[in-house]
Image: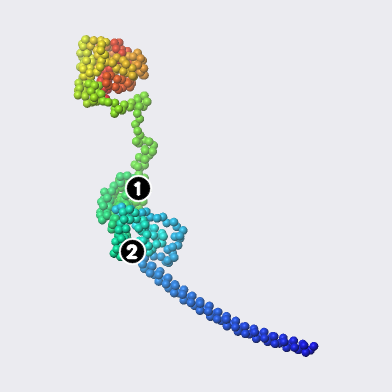
Amino acid sequence: MSGLMDELIQDNVEISNAAKEMIKVLGDSHGKEMYDILVEVTNLRKFVEEELHALRKNVDEVRAEWHSRHASNGNASTSTSCTMVGTHNIKVPKPDTYNGTRNATMVENFLFGLEQYYKALGIIDDGAKIANAPNFLRESAQLWWRRKHAEWEKDRTILQTWEQFKAELRKHFVPHNADMEARGKLRRLRQIGSIPDYIKEFTTLMLEIEDLSDKDALFHFRDDLKDWAKIELDRRNVRTLDDAIAAAGALIDIYSKEKKRRVDEGEAFEPKKEGNSKQDGKYGKAPFANKDTIPPTCFLCKGPHWTRDCPKKNKLSAIVANPREEEEVPIKGTAQLGGIRYLSAMKSESSKEPQEGGLLYVDATFNNKAALAMLDAGATHNVMDPEEAKRLGLRTTRRSDTEIKIISAKSMKNIGWAQDVKTRVGGWQGKLNFLIAHLDDCKIILGLDFVDTAHSS
């Protein structure tokens, strides 16, 4: 039993020694591996630091070169990454196209819009700018670019800088005398319309003149304003062009405001109303018939012309000019009221059988109804009997303050008035006014009022 115990103890000692030996071997091997790993990590760190240092050096060189190349154009930036910050979230609108119009303002506006577009997108390379610019050319400008591009390919020359592209565009599309034209327009410029329109035109001309000083620009701007605007600018004591434009833009053009108010309220350009005197008031005027639709017929000689062109108009004018001469010859059996002389000049149709010797009657229509009227150049007005006016269906108004005198008859007071009565005598037609009064021998008298109306039509 004791021998077995001694054997177990001996085995345990051997196992312990073998384990210790193995642990020692493993420890030595692990320490070596750890050392190798530490050396490898140290070498790798050193390599990364060297590469990072070289990269930083390259970035600094690129940054310095970028600063030196774009410092003159005001495009310097602290780092390359700064030019792209925020541009991905901004929708930049495209500039307007250019169609080749030979106008200095349009060319400069096109170039300015392109440069702002490139700046917003962060494009700083001249080659990229020149390559994208033709996409915004249209019509004759596009044809010009195609021709120039073909010439450059043939000669194997290309535009190197953006400034060269702008110079070529200005050389072809900006008129050579644009500066002189702009100076002439500026010298002749005057404020005629509103102040905003004047400011817009002045600013456009000023941009076309390269060497216009601020002092001269301020003088021209103030001198071309209206007098009341000049006084306002002087009162505000403006010293710079920007202050003058701001002050002028804030002024209220009282004349333009008043005119706009009148137009809005319907006080200006109000069309005249048409209608008769009863519809339009005391000073109303009845519309005339369209003479273009009526063939011309002279009521004097019934010829194919207007009365104003009649060769016998002088006879009628002489009769109208001297009605008193007829009143002073009241001889029975003759045309004592100038009726025969009037009819000889007029040659109108009369009734075949006169009602009374020496008096002249004509067939006429009043208010589209036939009636017999007497021509009496000695009567100052047209007169109608009230019964006849009632038969003809005329609308009359009462009036009793006018005394009328008809030759060979006593003076009488009228009892009414009929206006704008549609009348047709022979070839003449128009509207007449009648005094309503009691008549003895005839029912309707056409006096000098009829002669004047017929003569003036």
Measure the C-alpha gap from mark 2 to mark 1. Answer: 39 Å
| Residue 40, horizontal then vertical, whole percent | 53, 79
| Residue 220, horizontal then vertical, whole percent | 29, 51
Q: Which numbered disc, 2 or 1, marks the residue that appears first in the sequence?
A: 2
**Residue ID at (32%, 21%):** 422
Secondary element at tag 2: loop
**Residue ID at (33%, 17%):** 369
Residue toward you, 352 or 185: 352
Task: Reply above or below: 80 against 320.
Answer: below
| Residue 363, horizontal then vertical, whole percent | 28, 16
Residue 161 disc label: 2
- In the displayed structure image, the side of residue 300 where residue 28 appears, left or right: right
Which amino acid lies under the numbered mark 2 shown in the image of this protein? Answer: Thr
Are dots 2 and 1 in contact, CB under 8 Å?
no
Q: Quadrant of residue 3?
A: bottom right
Residue toward you, 58 or 260: 58
Secondary element at tag 1: helix
Task: Reply above or below: 256 against 209.
Answer: above
Residue 307 disc label: none
Label count reads 2
Q: Quadrant of residue 260?
A: top left
Report crowding for label 2: few under 14, some 14 to 19, many 20 or more residues within 10 A (C-alpha): few
| Residue 311, horizontal then vertical, whole percent | 19, 24
Q: Quadrant of residue 125?
A: bottom left
- Pointer 1: what residue? 196
Which amino acid lies under the numbered mark 1 shown in the image of this protein? Answer: Pro
Q: Is residue 437 visible?
A: no
**Residue ID at (29%, 63%):** 154
